[in-house]
């Protein structure tokens, strides 16, 4: 069920890679400003340079290559996740005090937004039981075997009912970079990681942004485009 509100949500898209510490500092401040009534809600589309993040349930044994990329404590729910170029991240700073104080419904709305985005490219995404959080796709691999691959990760945190962190959607990342971790703690070899381009779809981030924006607006309400935060350029 959508968690719509009548007021517009600020929406920003960063064209350059944003360092993880810069993004976290911005989100921390923005969430505090929303709590105190000094700022509007916000959804922020961006990309990070290659890095790993550890959620509150991360197990050290799931960090397989600790020296491969920088590793950050995310403070969100979940386990280890990879972020990097070619992956659309949507950080979602919404005030559930103005919507509905229901974490389960909020997570479902985020998942539905991703599923609807995939549907715009004729990809059927679906959720799986815990602990396989996120959005998955069924696919046939060599030999005709069926496999389930994760295409979108989800991790949120709430502070006084204002959300931060959000979702990541694999558009065209380097999938080999996931090899440095056990993604989200899922070790079963039947389950992997994929992207839209890996599925054979020649789509760009801008294509995905159009569909993702429409899906978010259907769940949460209209977007109001604003300028993206400015930082020093992050290296890929």
Image (spheres, rainbow, N blue to C red):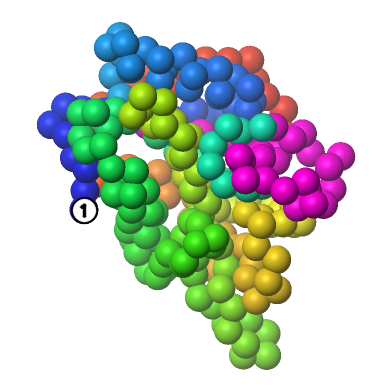
Residue 194, quarter of picture: bottom right
Q: Viewer-proximal residue, 93 or 170?
A: 93
Q: Is residue 160 left or right of residue 25?
A: left
| Residue in front for this viewpoint, 219 or 47 | 219
Q: Is residue 92 above or below residue 143?
A: above
Tell whether 58 sits left or right of 117. Answer: right
Which residue in the structure is indicated by mark 1?
Answer: 1
Residue 107 within the magenta-colored segment of the rendering: no
Q: Is residue 98 above or below residue 102?
A: above
Q: Quadrant of the C terminus?
A: top right
The quarter holding residue 6 reads top left
Residue 87 left/right relative to 109: right
Is label 1 in a helix, a strand or a loop? loop
Residue positioned 46% across, 35% down in the render: 157
Q: Is residue 113 visible?
A: no
Residue name at image x 68 percent, y 90 percent: 143
Does residue 87 sit above or below 175 in this rendering? above
- Magenta residues span 43-72
Q: Position of residue 232 (x, y in %)?
A: 63, 15
């Amino acid at each position: 069920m959508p968690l719509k509100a009548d007021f517009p949500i600020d929406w920003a898209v960063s064209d350059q890679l944003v360092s993880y510490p810069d993004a976290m500092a911005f989100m921390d401040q923005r969430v505090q400003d929303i709590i105190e009534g000094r700022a509007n809600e916000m959804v922020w589309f961006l990309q990070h340079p290659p890095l790993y993040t550890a959620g509150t349930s991360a197990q050290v044994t799931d960090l397989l290559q600790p020296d491969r990329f920088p590793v950050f404590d995310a403070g969100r729910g979940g386990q280890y996740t990879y972020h990097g170029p070619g992956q659309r991240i949507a950080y979602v700073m919404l005030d559930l005090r103005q919507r509905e104080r229901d974490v389960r419904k909020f997570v479902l709305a985020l998942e539905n937004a991703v599923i609807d985005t995939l549907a715009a490219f004729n990809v059927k995404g679906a959720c799986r039981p815990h602990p396989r959080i996120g959005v998955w796709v069924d696919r046939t691999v060599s030999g005709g075997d069926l496999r389930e691959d994760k295409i979108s990760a989800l991790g949120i945190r709430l502070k006084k009912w204002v959300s931060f962190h959000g979702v990541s959607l694999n558009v065209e990342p380097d999938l080999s970079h996931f090899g440095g971790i056990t993604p989200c703690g899922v070790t079963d070899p039947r389950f992997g990681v994929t992207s839209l381009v890996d599925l054979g779809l020649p789509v760009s981030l801008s294509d995905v942004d159009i569909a993702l924006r429409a899906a978010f607006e259907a769940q949460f309400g209209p977007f109001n485009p604003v300028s993206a935060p400015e930082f020093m350029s992050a290296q890929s």
